Image: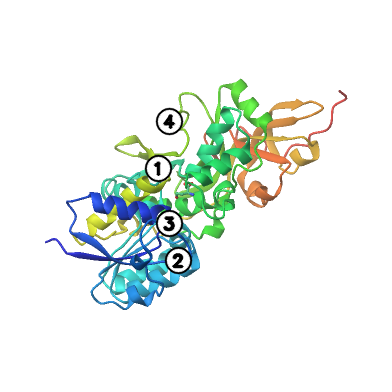
Amino acid sequence: MRSRLNIGLFGFGVVGTGLYEVLNKSKLLEARITKIVVKDPTKKRGLPAEAFLYDKDAILKDDSINVVVELINDSEAAYAIVLEALKNGKHVVSANKKLIAEHLEELIATAKENNVSFLYEAAVGGSIPIIRNLEEYYNNDSLSSVQGIVNGTTNYILTQSNHGVAYEEALAKAQELGFAEIDPTLDVDGFDSKYKLVLLIKHAFGLVVEPKDVFNYGIRNIKPQDVKYAGEKGYRIKLFSRAEKLGNDIVGFVAPHFVKSDHFAYQVDNEFNAVVVEALFSDKQLFIGKGAGSYPTASAVLSDISALQFDYQYEYRKSIGNENVNFQDDFYLKAYVGSQFIEAINTIPFYRVDEVYQSETYNYQTGWVRFEDVKELDLNQLPDLSFIVLPDAFVAANQPEKLKSERIQYLTEFEL
Ligand code: HSE
């Protein structure tokens, strides 16, 4: 049976405004926004001032409201709102990946205790219906990997860098278009991609991983020389969120990757996101769609609201029976490390070197590195160093036959 949905909306920014408009256009839904609560009374918005309230209790303590849609930027304030709404017996739809990734277990438990739904399709991949598919479609198919581009801002900047647009200019444009977070560090240093990866790992593999345990390295340090290297090799650079099975365990991290022209991500440009799911029976399946922006993100929120009409809840069935599966970091991967300074390249130990290039202005080295070594470094804070993953499979630490068991000696400066 369909439930009549009275929505209390928190936030009227890029996504909130989009939701208001798409909900008005979508005639099929038995849902209406009855109250909107925002923070700043002085801010100009697309509706008259009387349309807004400023006290969260106006929604949270209103018994006629059975759905809270939380679309605010402040993840701490959002946490308090979502928790209280669930405790007050209201269904919650949120797009706040940081809040959800940081409090996932508690929020799932609170929703369950209060027998309400907590849905967040818009938190990962914007318009791409990836959470619902992982929950429902792949329920009986054993997954081996979930990976892809899940941040529109960085994909926009990287795409523009192929056309010679400078980093700062591309970021400013991404902010203007409403793709970037209020604090764009979350985008460019890979935090946003990491929060989304945490949610993908929960729905794909049933594991709860703390964001602090997942390595994230973004695109801020990528230099024109790295983009040139990509061009010469026929690669493009893409920021990847990646989780896969290695033996019995799961490995996962966020880092820039070189992709070849036959790779699914090669042609995925601007704010588009793409996620590939690999499963035992269905093999590889690719989802592409707009990952950021007002209407695309609002469309995923709308879909969650629509699912609430039928009392839809996530069941987290992948979490059952996976007690022996761990999240681990002990593996090797093939990488490119570039810098103006040779000492900077030597920050990362190599276990096999495949290619070395030195010049007066730029140097790079490619080869196999141990992920545990890389994870110890806060690469986002090393502006002189570019670290980019090359397109090769990972090698588990217990099978390094093609690698040296000891790190090789440091790169030394040649006489030029
Ligand atoms: N800042 C995010 C992005 C918004 O660029 O993908 C959508 O989650």
Q: CA distance from mark 2 to mark 1?
A: 26 Å
Q: Quadrant of the N terminus?
A: bottom left
Q: Report the residue at 23% width, 56% height from top.
A: 307
User: In the rendered structure, which amino acid carries the disc numbered 4?
Assistant: Phe
Looking at the image, residue 260 lies above or below residue 116: above
* First in sequence: mark 4 vs mark 1: 1
Q: Please give the label number shown on residue 264.
A: 4
User: In the rendered structure, which amino acid carries the disc numbered 3?
Assistant: Gly
Q: Which residue is mark 3?
A: 13
Q: Nearer the viewer, mark 4 or mark 1?
A: 4
Q: Is mark 4 within 8 Å of ligand 1?
A: no
Rendering quarter of residue 157: top right
**Pointers 4 and 1 in contact (C-beta within 8 Å):** no
**Pointers 2 and 1 in contact (C-beta within 8 Å):** no
**Where residue 248 sits in the image (x, y, percent)?**
44, 49
Q: Nearer the viewer, residue 297 or 352?
A: 297
- Packing grade of label 3 (10 A; few <14, some 14-19, many >=20) is some
Looking at the image, residue 55 lies above or below residue 413: below
Query: Residue furthest toward the left?
Result: 1
Q: Which residue is mark 1?
A: 144
Q: Which residue is mark 2?
A: 103
User: In the image, 396: left or right of 111?
Assistant: right
Q: Please give the label number shown on residue 416.
A: none
Q: CA distance from mark 1 to mark 3?
A: 37 Å
